[in-house]
Image: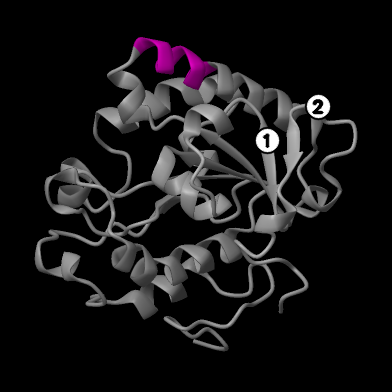
Amino acid sequence: MGIMHIPGHTRQAPREVALEEIRAVMGDCRLCELCQTRTNIVFGVGNPHARVMFVGEAPGRNEDLQGEPFVGRAGENLNSILSLAGLTRDEIYIANVLKCRPPGNRNPKPDEVLACSPFLREQIRSIWPDVIVTLGNPATHFVLKTEIGITRLRGRFHQTGHFTVMPTFHPAAALRNPAWQELLEEDFRMLGDWLARHPASGAGVHAQAQGAGEPNTVEAEHNADALPRPEEG
């Protein structure tokens, strides 16, 4: 497994550890009580070299049964609006903060997030996306290290350490609120505009220069330690 150590992992350079290695280290994870009620670990799925990585909250019932994120109604909603950003499901990577379903789809507990966070961090490091799209409050709070609600954070890009982050509503929540669905679709169009203005970087290098001349981008220097950066090898 090279230099990867999970949990209590060390920080590596981008793409140094393959997703398959991270999944192998996770194994039949027993780090929190969710292992007692899950059907499947839902690790993540998609393009290992994706420009855009989507981070959700936790698996739902359908995801738990199938072992893949965003396969229920929320997944159908996500699939239907990806085209607004000029994306297809084959071009993106999707993961959740939690890899196991919380009973009754309750919110993640702090100890569960703590147990799962090394795996998500290593997934992000392996993929090294140009943009991380956080879906809903739990994912946004984890990535941006803030308690500010999604309604105040959405509609613009944020910088946290190396990464450009676009918070938006969770597709499941948007299905229950037509106004949120409209805003979700608006955010995906904004994402498409951003991608069109920023050519593929290969390893997300453009994010280091993000900010100048970008009216929809805000800096979050106080959150610079939230996710791995290239100098933290």
| In-front residue for pair 149/10 | 149
Please give left or right for residue 29 compared with residue 174 in the image.
left
What amino acid is found at the position of numbered circle 1 in the picture? Phe
Note whether residue 94 is visible: no
The structure's colour scheme is one colour
Disc 2 on helix, strand or loop? loop
Magenta-drawn stretch contains 183: yes
What amino acid is found at the position of numbered circle 2 in the picture? Pro
Q: Label 2: few (<14), some or many (≥20) within 10 Å?
A: few
- The spot of residue 133 in percent (x, y) is 54, 40
Q: Label 1: few (<14), some or many (≥20) within 10 Å?
A: many
- Overall secondary structure of the magenta stretch? helix
Residue receiving disc 2: 215
- The spot of residue 182 in percent (x, y) is 46, 12
Residue drawn at point x = 60 percent, y = 61 percent: 226
Q: Which residues are magenta?
A: 178-185
Magenta-drawn stretch contains 42: no
